[in-house]
Image (cartoon, rainbow, N blue to C red):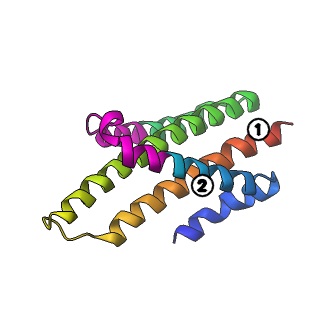
C-alpha cells in the first residue's frame, strides 16, 4: 500500500531528476534527527507536541484543498505548494524527533522489565515519517528543479 501511494511522487522525482538527492537527504535527516531525539530528546521535546503537530497537519490539509480550488495563477500555485511542502517537511521532522524521544523512553522501560517491546509498531511509525519526509523533499526539490 505504501509503495502504491509513493508511485506518483517517485515519477515526479524521476521526471525532475531529484530522487537520489531526496533519498540521500532523507537518510541524513533521519540519522541526525534520530541522534538528537534519542540522546537529547528530553531537552528538545519538553512537552508532548504530537497532538499539536497532528492538528497542524489537519489544518494544512484543509488549506491545501481550499488553496487548490481558489488559487488560479500558476506562479501563486507554485509558491503555495513550495510553502506548504516546507511546512509539511518541518512538521514531519518534528514528529520524527518526538518519535525517537518516545523510542528512548520505551527502551528505558524495557530494561526494567515494565514493558514488552512492540518493535513492528515502533519501526512502522519511523518508516512512515521517513517516507513522508522523502515525499516532501522530492516535492520541494522537484518544484525547484522544474522552475529552472
Element at label 2: helix
> Residue 78: x percent and y percent?
71, 34
Density class for disc 2 (Cα within 10 Å; few <14, some 14-19, many ≥20) is some
* Viewer-side residue, 131 vs 34: 34
Density class for disc 1 (Cα within 10 Å; few <14, some 14-19, many ≥20) is some
Vertical position of residue 120 compared to residue 41: above or below: below
Q: Residue at x 53, y 52 (%)?
A: 31
Element at label 1: helix
- Circle 2 or circle 1, nearest the eye: 2
Image quadrant of residue 71?
top right
The residue tagged 1 is 144
Marks 2 and 1, how far apart in space? 20 Å
Q: Residue at x 74, y 61 (%)?
A: 11
Is residue 12 visible in the rendered image? The answer is: no
Whether residue 25 sits left or right of residue 41 in the image: it is: right
The residue tagged 2 is 27
Q: Residue at x 41, y 36 (%)?
A: 59
> Residue 145: x percent and y percent?
81, 42
Magenta range is: 33-58
Whether residue 140 sits left or right of residue 48 in the image: it is: right
* Viewer-side residue, 45 vs 12: 45
Magenta region, main secondary structure: helix
Amino acid at each position: 500500500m505504501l509503495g502504491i501511494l509513493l508511485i506518483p511522487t517517485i515519477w515526479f522525482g524521476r521526471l525532475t531528476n531529484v530522487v537520489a538527492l531526496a533519498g540521500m537527504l532523507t537518510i541524513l535527516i533521519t540519522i541526525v534527527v534520530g541522534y538528537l531525539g534519542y540522546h537529547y530528546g528530553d531537552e528538545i521535546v519538553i512537552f508532548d507536541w504530537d497532538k499539536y503537530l497532528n492538528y497542524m497537519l489537519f489544518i494544512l490539509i484543509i488549506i491545501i484543498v481550499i488553496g487548490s480550488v481558489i488559487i488560479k495563477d500558476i506562479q501563486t500555485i507554485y509558491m503555495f505548494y513550495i510553502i506548504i511542502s516546507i511546512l509539511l517537511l518541518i512538521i514531519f521532522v518534528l514528529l520524527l524527533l518526538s518519535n525517537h524521544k518516545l523510542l528512548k523512553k520505551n527502551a528505558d522501560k524495557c530494561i526494567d522489565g515494565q514493558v514488552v517491546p512492540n518493535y513492528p509498531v515502533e519501526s512502522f511509525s519511523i518508516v512512515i515519517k521517513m517516507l513522508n519526509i522523502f515525499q516532501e523533499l522530492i516535492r520541494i526539490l522537484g518544484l525547484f528543479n522544474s522552475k529552472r
